[in-house]
Image (cartoon, helix red, strand yellow):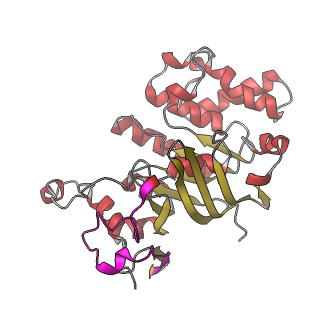
Amino acid sequence: MTALLSVRDLTVTYRTSQGEVPAVRGVSFELEPGGSLGLAGESGCGKSTMANAILRLLPAGITTTGEVLLGEEDVLTMKPGRLRAVRWTGAAIVFQGALHALNPVQRVIDQITEPIILHKTEPDKKAAEKRAVDLLGQVGIPANRAEDYPHQLSGGQRQRVLIAMALACDPDLLIADEPTTALDLMVQAQVLAVLEKLRAERQLSMIFITHDLSVLTYVCDRLAVMYAGRIVERGPSDQVFERPTHPYTRALAAAFPTIGDRESRMNPSGLKGDPPDPAALPAGCPFHPRCPDAIDRCRDAEPPLLPSGPAQEAACILARP
């Protein structure tokens, strides 16, 4: 099957007063039509930077190299007019922090109809408004709330509005960048259920970004774990979560307690230390200063992604089948 999205050797470099800082370092993956990929990792590992780079949403002054093939077109080389046409219709993004992503002085229905009218996916404004109300209904918001302003909605409702906006022009790819951040567990579960339902009904391809591995096993077929700007492990989501082969993935998985298991709540083997400074990465494997299994060879060279199990890969010299 031809991939809907192919990311090849994607590198994103920030320019700072201290020099160039690599935020994403040679990331490659593919996503098939109707497939879903979860991206996990601590804050600062490059997840959101990569998501924004896929649709060229990063500000000027940031260097992006590699290929981002949406179908057969490279997003990174598209002319501005073509890029505007692809956003919303080919791929759309749900940002974290709905209160910051929504316009506080525009009604919800106006914000959803704007891309529909811009891309002319409906014949007129009346049809666009009807579609907006239908989309709100699909994400669980009643029609009588369409005229509300963002501040009149709860956090979960605002997040659902963002999902409705992202689906306004029926894109093939949806990128959800930590869409459940700052939501309580009940609302988080509702938003995840909405995304899963819509993905199944529309055959959406989806990239879901979060630091929570347990969430990704619920909504995604495949899982990739990032550390210091690189993917360090990937494979089927349940397999990566239940049988991780990279020590960093094991530490992330161990951070989530098992219901009814008191020992898992008192686990003393949590990950120590902080992620490395992207401007001053350690020699060899960037994880070795925090790794409980590190050996001398880990300081020699950064390991590539190699098979570590059935349909599973890890960037660790000790993670071999």
Q: Which residues are magenta?
A: 280-307
| 184, above or below 295, in the image | above
Residue placed furthest toward the front? 18
Left or right of 20? Residue 156 is left
Report the magenta stretch's main SS: loop
Front position in the image: 244 or 63: 63
Quadrant containing the N terminus is bottom right
How many numbered circles are shown?
Answer: 0
Quadrant containing the C terminus is bottom left
| 126, above or below 213, in the image | above
Location of residue 238 in the rendering, given as x and y in whole percent from the top left corner: 41, 66
Q: Is residue 302 one of those drawn in magenta?
A: yes
Residue 109 visible in rendering: yes
- The residue drawn where x is 56% and y is 16% is 149
Front position in the image: 304 or 143: 304
Location of residue 95 in the rendering, given as x and y in whole percent from the top left corner: 55, 38
Residue 218 visible in rendering: no
Q: Quadrant of residue 144?
A: top right
- The residue drawn where x is 54% and y is 20% is 150
Location of residue 48 in the rendering, given as x and y in whole percent from the top left corner: 52, 47
Q: Is residue 174 one of those drawn in magenta?
A: no
Left or right of 55? Residue 86 is right
Left or right of 152? Residue 290 is left
Q: Quadrant of residue 162?
A: top right
Location of residue 182 in the rendering, given as x and y in whole percent from the top left corner: 39, 34
Front position in the image: 187 or 4: 4
| 230, above or below 99, in the image | below
Left or right of 61? Residue 248 is left
- The residue drawn where x is 84% and y is 25% is 124
Front position in the image: 162 or 177: 177
- The residue drawn where x is 76% and y is 60% is 71
